[in-house]
Image (cartoon, rainbow, N blue to C red):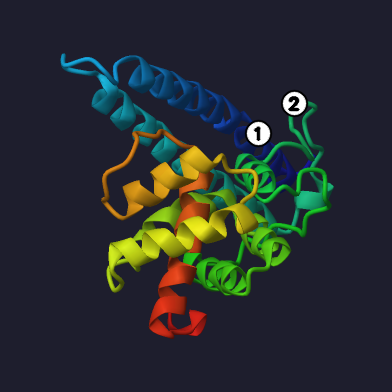
Amino acid sequence: MSLLAALASRVVTVRSDLPVVEIDVASSRLRSALSLLAATLAASSGPSPALLLASASSHLDAAAGALGRAGDELSRYLASVGVVSGVPVPSAVAVSGSCPWADRVDVLTAQVGVARPSVDDRLSVSAVLRSAVSAASRGDRVALRQSLVVAPDSVGWSLAAHAAGRLGSVAPGSLQRDSLALLPRLLPGLPASDGAALVAQALRLPGDPVSAHPADVAAVGVVLVSVVLSLTGASPEDL
C-alpha cells in the first residue's frame, strides 16, 4: 500500500470512529429525561434542574454538529486527494446506514422508507433554508423533505439558528396561528403538542416546556419562516 493510500485509510478509520451516533443517542435520552422531569415537576414550587439539563442537551447538540462538521471535512479531504474509491474501507465503517439528521426529517415528514436523494456537501445553510422555505411556502411536503435530507448533518444542525433570525418582522400572534395551521400538513410526524410548544418557544410566547430533537426545531423554524414570507409578501429568494 502506498503512503497516500495508507494515510487515506487512516483518515477513513478516524472518520468512522467519530462518536456521532453515540452523541445522538445520548442527546435523545437526555431530551426524554428532561421532558419527563418537566412533566413531573410542573406542579412543584421548588427549584427545578430542568434548565441545567436543557443546557446539557444544548451542549450535546452542539457536539453532534461539531462532529458532523469534522466528518464532512474528513470526507472532503478524502475526495480532494482522489483516493476514496481505492482505499480499503475497514469493516467497522458503515458504508450506508443511519443518518441522524435525515432519519429524523423522514419521521417528521412521514417519508420513512422512501428513497432519499444523495447528500450534497456543497450546500450552504442559506441555500438549504431558501429551498426548504420555498417548498414549505408551496405546501409541498415531499419537496420540503427533499430540500432537508440533501443537507449535510452539520448544515442541518445549523438551520434552526438561521431560521430564528428571520422571525422578528411579523406579529407573534399571527405567526403562531398560521404556522400551527401548517404544521400538520408539512410535518405530520411531529406531535401536535410538540409543534405548539416549539412554535411558542421560537416566538418567545408562553407555552409548555419542550426538549425536542434538533431536527424538530429546525423544521419548525423553516415552517415559521415560510409563514413570515407569506404574511409579508416576501420571496424565498430574499432570504
Residue 224 sits above or below residue 60 on the image: below
Please state if 93 lies on the left or on the right of 126 as rendered. right
Residue 164 sits above or below residue 213 on the image: below
Q: Residue at x 26, y 44 (%)?
A: 206
Give coordinates of residue 27: x percent, y percent. Answer: 47, 28
Quarter holding residue 136:
bottom right
Circle 1 SS class: helix
Q: Which mark is residue 218?
A: none
Q: Residue at x 34, y 22 (%)?
A: 38
Give the mark, 2 or 1, whose residue is nearer the N terminus.
Answer: 1
Which amino acid is tagged 2? Ala
Q: Nearer the viewer, residue 188 or 118?
A: 188
Give coordinates of residue 191: x percent, y percent. Answer: 56, 39
Q: Nearer the viewer, residue 89 or 48?
A: 48
Q: Quadrant of the N terminus?
A: top right
Q: Residue at x 40, y 40 (%)?
A: 62
- Can residue 70 be seen? no
Give coordinates of residue 165: x percent, y percent. Answer: 32, 64
Q: CA distance from mark 2 to mark 1?
A: 7 Å
Residue with the mark numbered 2: 92
Q: Nearer the viewer, residue 65 or 173?
A: 173
Residue with the mark numbered 1: 16
CB under 8 Å between discs 2 and 1: yes
Which amino acid is tagged 1? Ser
